[in-house]
């Protein structure tokens, strides 16, 4: 080392290295390093415990009949409280909508991946690892009174994790003031993702659907428990169930709900409006079958005709009509023996 640096080195050793300040820096660095090492070891242990717990839970669920529902933490303002409330709502009310099937609600780790594709991939991996049928996660972008934006990946009871259905929407704020109504709504929406047939009333026997339909009516009667989008979903499902159950009381409720929605003046999604008009028409015809009223029948026919006109613009229906026309053309050609006698039945 050049001799010109010797005075500087001697000064450093005498003034800095041997000072109390330097010793303090060294002690502080040692403390920080120790804290970091302890934190790293604790984090690794926590991951190990989580992995073992998930593995044991997976083995248990693979050998147990019923649904496995995993709830990941809802992030954002008040997310921890809402996560606990969702778990409590499922434990308390989910059995009302699973028709006696056993279920298990477990806590999933936080899904940290960013981006829609990344979140879905992480959720699929968790479904595969945990052998659950559904995983739920979400976030809260507003204040503590804002609804939670929720995403669900559900195997629907029989799908593989890679083919699981994705649902997204909003859960109402769960608190002590509205717990009874909102908890049942949350439980129903999760049950609906587990059993998509709940949105189609004819998928279950009428006697099974009657208690569920009555709960949905109670939820619809609470003006503050539902956001409009969720209210439309519940209204659609109840109408489908009620028409399948039948009975004057349910038919009157469907007619009242659907007529009120169609006359509200709001801009409705085309699919929802079609279903609403069909439901109203069917309900009015059902009531007329019980007690004939020509005015009801004419109103029912008006709504059904509008629904038919709206359906004519549906691309799938247009494709079905074109296919049907082609089939009819082929049948006509086979039936026309004169044409085949002229051509000899040959084709070009």
Image (cartoon, rainbow, N blue to C red):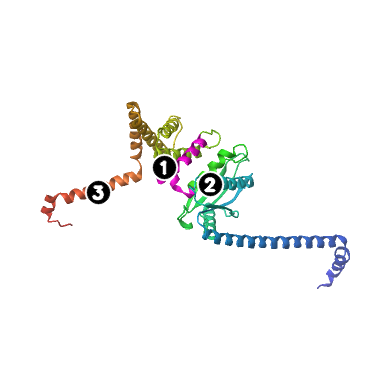
Task: Look at the image and tell me whether residue 76 can be seen.
Answer: no
Work out whether residue 131 or residue 79 is closer to the camera in this orientation and state it: 131
State the separation of the CA atoms marked 3 and 2.
48 Å
State the separation of the CA atoms marked 1 and 2.
19 Å
User: In the image, which disc is placed on residue 300?
Assistant: none
80 sits left or right of 239 in the view? right
218 sits left or right of 244 in the view? right
Q: Counting other residues with Cα less than 10 Å from the Cα at mark 3, is it few (<14), some (14-19), or many (20 or more)?
A: few
The local secondary structure at tag 1 comes to: helix
The local secondary structure at tag 3 comes to: helix
Q: In this view, does 347 lie above or below 83?
A: below
Q: Mark 2 points at which residue?
A: 94
Secondary structure mostly taken by the magenta-highlighted segment of the chain: helix
- The residue range painted magenta reads 193-220
293 sits left or right of 52 in the view? left
Q: Name the residue under label 1.
A: 206
56 sits left or right of 340 in the view? right
State the separation of the CA atoms marked 3 and 1.
39 Å
User: In the image, which disc is placed on residue 326?
Assistant: 3
Earlier-in-chain disc, 3 versus 2: 2
């Amino acid at each position: 080392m050049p001799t010109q640096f010797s005075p500087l080195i001697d000064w450093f050793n005498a003034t800095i290295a041997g000072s109390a300040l330097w010793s303090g820096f060294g002690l502080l660095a040692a403390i920080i390093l120790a804290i970091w090492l302890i934190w790293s070891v604790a984090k690794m242990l926590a991951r190990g415990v989580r992995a073992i717990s998930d593995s044991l839970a997976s083995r248990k669920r693979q050998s147990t009949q019923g649904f496995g529902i995993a709830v990941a933490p809802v992030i954002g303002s008040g997310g921890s409280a809402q996560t606990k409330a969702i778990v409590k709502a499922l434990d308390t009310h989910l059995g009302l909508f699973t028709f006696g099937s056993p279920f298990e609600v477990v806590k999933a780790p936080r899904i940290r991946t960013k981006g829609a594709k990344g979140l879905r991939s992480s959720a699929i991996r968790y479904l595969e690892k945990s052998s659950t049928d559904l995983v739920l996660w979400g976030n809260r972008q507003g204040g503590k009174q804002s609804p939670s934006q929720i995403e669900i990946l559900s195997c629907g009871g029989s799908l593989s994790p890679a083919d699981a259905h994705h649902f997204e929407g909003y859960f109402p704020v769960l608190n002590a003031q509205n717990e009874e109504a909102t908890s049942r709504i949350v439980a129903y929406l999760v049950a609906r993702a587990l059993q998509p047939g709940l949105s189609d009333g004819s998928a279950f026997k009428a006697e099974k659907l009657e208690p569920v339909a009555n709960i949905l009516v109670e939820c619809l009667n609470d003006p503050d428990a539902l956001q409009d989008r969720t209210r439309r979903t519940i209204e659609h499902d109840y109408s489908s169930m009620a028409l399948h159950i039948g009975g004057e009381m349910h038919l009157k409720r469907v007619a009242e709900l659907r007529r009120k929605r169609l006359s509200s003046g709001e801009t409705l999604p085309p699919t929802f409006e079609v279903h609403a008009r069909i439901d109203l028409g069917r309900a009015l015809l059902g009531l007329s079958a019980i007690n004939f009223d020509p005015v009801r029948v004419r109103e029912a026919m008006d709504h059904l005709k509008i629904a038919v006109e709206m359906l004519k613009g549906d691309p799938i229906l247009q494709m079905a009509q074109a296919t049907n026309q082609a089939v009819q053309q082929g049948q006509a050609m086979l039936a026309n023996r004169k044409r085949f006698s002229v051509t000899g039945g040959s084709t070009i």
